[in-house]
Structure formats: structure tokens, C-alpha cells
Image (cartoon, helix red, strand yellow):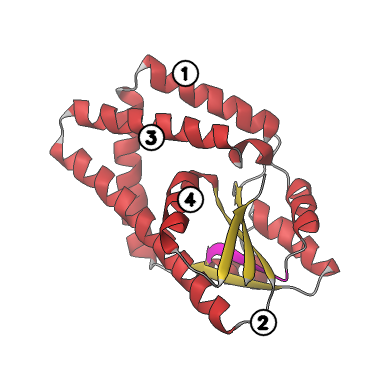
Amino acid sequence: MKDITIVFTKHKEAGAFRSSVLIGILDSLEPDIIFLEASHDDYQSQFITKSYESLESKALTSFKEKHNIDLIPTGESYNTEFLTKTMNEYQQFSRAIDIHSTEFFRAKYTEMESKENIEGFAYVNSEQFGENQKELNLEEKTIIERIENPELMKLYEQWNALQREREERMLGEINRYSLGAPFKKATFLIGAAHRNSIVNQVQKLGEESIKWSYYQ
């Protein structure tokens, strides 16, 4: 049976989120390979042409200098037109949420942001973060529903559907790769925003050849 540990992360260094901390986490896990949320295009720009640097790419570049380890991109590659359209739509409903946000939403968002800056990886990989994220997401949906704008609701639902599709694709890629690869231990790095959805999807997999666990 293969062991895969999921580590929830952030894509940019800020506050307690430092590449050095992620390197320490990887050192403690000692993975044989590392699965990335990044697509093949992202992998090229972060590790080959090095035209873009993320917290993960900075940490992994250093980690690979000490360890002979494969990095496996699992994300879907999208064309520039689709990405631009999707981000514009995300910003549209996100601005609406900001404008119509409730006191509870603002307080919860501020609380989570503060904990992230102070506690970093320990917080976003905790059950507390999962509970806070669930509360924030429920309030976010309530705000969108109260606006009573069908177009905004459509964009909101499309965005969430896209995230679920991306997550299903990543888990599917990991499963397919794991069937023929000889590794024993792996780590999957994915953004903390996906935490609750990924946990739910992993619970439904029922994959007997993979033992899933979460970094704590």
C-alpha cells in the first residue's frame, strides 16, 4: 500500500508562510515523490523556464538540491483566454460579496487571516481551519443568495464547479500514476482553499491501494 500525505499550503510567501518552513515539513515526511497542484504549464514556468516563482517552487527547488525526487504535476492546463475569463468572473462575484458582506463574514475572514499570518502551515492543516473555512463558505453562499442576482449566482456556481472538477482531476491523476509507480511514500501539495472539498472527496474514493493522511 502506498502512503500519500496531503499538505495544505499557500502559493505566496507571507507572514508565517515561508519556503523554509515547507522544506522542514517535507524533510519530516521524507516523501519518495511529490504531487503538485500545478499543471504541466505551471510546472514549466516554475521549474524549467523559472519565469514564475511560488512559495512551493522556491521550497521544492531547494529541496531537490538535497534529494533525488520527482515532482509530478496533476493540474489541468487551460488556455489564456479561458483563464482570463474565469478570473474576471471570479472577481465580479467576489467584489459583490465584499460589498454585501455581513459583520460575521468580515469578522471570520479577519480572524482566519490573522491566524494564517501567525500560525501558518500549522493552522491551515488543522481541524480548526476546516471548521472556520466551512463557516466562511456557508456565509459566502448566503450573501450571494441574498443579493438575488441570477447572473452572480451562476458565476458563483460555475466557479465552485470548476474547483471540484480540478480537484477530481488531480486525485484521478494521482491514482493513475500510483498504479504503476514503485514509490512507497508521497506528498501532495495543494492550496488550503481546497481543504474541505479535498477531504470530502478523499473520503469517497475508497482506494484500497492508497493510504491517505493529512499533515498535522
Residue at disc 4, secondary structure: helix
**Do residues under tags 4 and 2 come within 8 Å of each other at their CB atoms?**
no
Identify the disc placed on residue 199.
Answer: 4
For disc 1, the neighbor class at 10 Å (few under 14, some 14 to 19, many from 20) is few
Residue 76: x %, y % from top left: 43, 68
User: Which residue was labeled with disc 1?
Assistant: 107
Q: CA distance from mark 3 to mark 1?
A: 13 Å
Residue placed farthest to the top in the image? 103
Among the two numbered marks 1 and 4 on one chain, the one whose residue lies closer to the N terminus: 1
Residue placed farthest to the right in the image? 66
User: Which residue was labeled with disc 3?
Assistant: 137
Residue type at the position of mark 2: Pro
User: Which residue was labeled with disc 2?
Assistant: 182
Please provide the residue range marked out in magenta.
32-38
Residue type at the position of mark 1: Ala
Residue at disc 1, secondary structure: helix
Decide whether the magenta segment is chiefly helix, strand or loop. Answer: strand
Residue, x 75% and y 64% (percent of image)? 61
User: For the residues carrying marks 3 and 1, which lies nearer the camera in this image?
Assistant: 3
Among the two numbered marks 4 and 3 on one chain, the one whose residue lies closer to the N terminus: 3
- Figure quadrant of residue 46: bottom right
Q: CA distance from mark 4 to mark 3?
A: 15 Å
Residue 53: x %, y % from top left: 65, 57
In the rendered image, which quarter contains the N terminus? bottom right
Figure check: 43 above or below 111:
below
**133 horizontally vs 190: left or right:** left
Residue, x 42% and y 49% (percent of image)? 197
Name the foreground residue: 16 vs 50.
16
For disc 3, the neighbor class at 10 Å (few under 14, some 14 to 19, many from 20) is few
